[in-house]
Amino acid sequence: MATLPIEYLRTTRLFKERIGDLEIISFEVPTHKYFSRNEIPYLATALDVDLRKLENMLSDMRYGRVAVEKLWAYRLDGDLIRESKKVLLPDLVANKDVDGEVEELEDTKILKIHVAKLKEFVRIFVKKRQGFREVIIYRKPPHPALIRYVAYL
């Protein structure tokens, strides 16, 4: 009996978050291994890869071709042992007034993403290592979170 290949790209739920007087649309990030389709714009921007090309690479992972590996997604205001809270990131496509800026250092690139009036609401750190790139996404409070990836591109 043949087994079906694992689908690494998944559609996750969207949430409306109220932050002060703003309302933003966020999506749930799977805690490890799997990717939300809404994560693709974050990774494509951080890794300077075409959106469709990255999506195809992640779809090919079901055949053993690993391009990007999600190590973990963790909500900083939760207790890892007792409870695991949902990791949320603002949807770059559904929200209005999404902007950003890039800061380049020696071997690190920092992307600062502004959502509406929330300046530097999400920061993406891309560090070049030998043979791979490490990507860390940090979301500010409320619901602070860290997501860590390793990209073999």
Image (tube, rainbow, N blue to C red):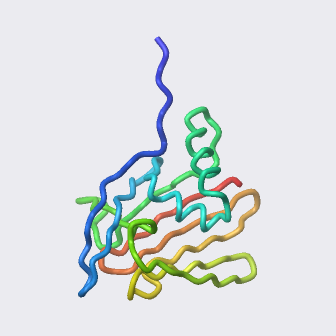
Identify the residue shown where x is 64% and y is 48%. 67
Quarter of the rendering occupied by the C terminus:
bottom right
The answer to which image quadrant residue 20 occupies is bottom left
Q: Position of residue 134 (x, y in %)?
A: 62, 64
Q: Residue furthest top?
A: 1
Q: Position of residue 30 (x, y in %)?
A: 39, 53
Camera-side residue: 18 or 94? 94
Q: Position of residue 127 (x, y in %)?
A: 66, 70
Identify the residue shown where x is 39% and y is 54%. 31
Give the side of residue 111 with respect to residue 13, left or right. Answer: right
Identify the residue shown where x is 39% and y is 72%. 95
Camera-side residue: 65 or 94? 94
Give the side of residue 30 with respect to residue 77, left or right. Answer: right
Up/down of 28 relative to 2, above or below: below
Camera-side residue: 149 or 99? 99
Q: Residue furthest front?
A: 96
Give the side of residue 148 with respect to residue 66, left or right. Answer: left
Q: Position of residue 82 (x, y in %)?
A: 23, 59
The answer to which image quadrant residue 25 occupies is bottom left
Identify the residue shown where x is 38% and y is 88%. 117
How many numbered discs? 0
Camera-side residue: 55 or 6? 55
